[in-house]
Image (tube, grey):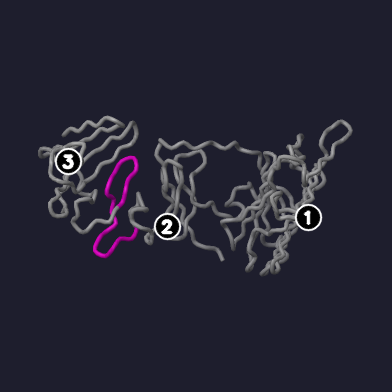
Amino acid sequence: MEQNRRCCRVCLPLVVGVALAATAAAGPIDVDRLSLKRSGDRQRLSFVSHDESWTLPTTAAPDDGPGPISIELFSTADPSGQTLGIPQLDAPTVWRVSRADDGSIVRFRLRNNAAPNAAGDFSGALLRQGRVLRFVGRRTGLALDGAQGQVGIRITMAGQVLCALFRDATVVADQPGRFVGKHALASDIPDCQTETLGGVTPCGVVPGAFECGGTCPEGESCVVDDPFAPSCHCVGPTSPCGDTAPMCNGTCPDGSACTQTTAGTFPTCGCVPPGGCEALSEYPTCGGTCPAGQECHPYFAQTGAFLQSSGCACVDPGPCGCTGTLACPTGQICTIAQVPGLCVPQCQ
């Protein structure tokens, strides 16, 4: 059953670096057959294509194979997808490479009767240029605990991304424990994007961008988790208030509200009682209530070249300083510039 999901994009600060991944050649291919079967502890995947558009690698990896291979499967029942793989090993074990008289590679063959193991999820594979691309796996990836609706497959190997989608007339069996698709055509789909294959992109850092993006369960949003990792996570009304910046829509104890408590490079949220000092909405006047013996004051802090924060805080009485007191003359704000070993407070 297709689930309703929500996609949200939230910018990550510019101090976070994201490595750019190289773009590989990609393209849908004609696939003769995809079969997924699961019964008890036994699982089997069979994939066969005689498409001639993909390219056989011209060099072999140290294990005599074509390099690491990733096979992703998506379905209506499991749009987040599952990944199977064949890793690249340090020495020849399961792969055998065949060459022509001139030394050029004509075939890669894999035999791994003990799969799944450290050599991957597949017991067999055959890659022969212009003739066949075949995989036999001991795992199905998808749980197959019900009808799949449609199944998309994406194969990443040797700098190429190949894919196919089985839907409508190309699905010949779809029931618990068994899915069979035949004669998927490259012309049926425009590209190998996750959404094209019936999948969804989970919440995470957008490659090549300083932002979070992807899908979350209905009612939740994809936001920054750790900006220095960087990482993203899904949050919503049932999440703790402090985790939900910048939306600030999480849960709080009875009698308090989840609200933004600081602005700046990394906004924060907190649970604030009605009329409480820390609510950012009162900044820069800051006249809310505080615990007995404390005062409500505005502040602005600059930490290093990029990190800034501002808000209202309950602090002990005392002039603007580096020890946590923030009082300034009326109309001015305590501004603190701080780097390791140096702190400069001033009222501005």
Disc 3, SS: loop
Q: Identify the residue at image location x=77%, y=47%.
A: 94
Label 2: few (<14), some (14–19) or many (≥20) C-alpha neighbours in 10 Å: many
Name the residue beneath numbered marker 1.
113
What amino acid is found at the position of numbered circle 2 in the picture?
Glu
Task: Please indicate whether residue 97 sits to the left or right of residue 314 in the image.
Answer: right
Does 255 appear in magenta?
A: yes
Label 1: few (<14), some (14–19) or many (≥20) C-alpha neighbours in 10 Å: few
**Above or below 155: residue 148:** below
What amino acid is found at the position of numbered circle 3 in the picture?
Leu
- The numbered mark at residue 220 is 2
Q: Residue furthest front?
A: 341
- The numbered mark at residue 326 is 3
**Above or below 282: residue 301:** above
Task: Please indicate whether residue 250 sits to the left or right of residue 192 in the image.
Answer: left
**Above or below 264: residue 43:** below
Towards the viewer: 252 or 345: 345
Q: Nearer the viewer, mark 3 or mark 2?
A: 3
Magenta-highlighted residues? 250-269
How far apart are the two marked residues, 1 and 3, measured between alpha carbons?
71 Å
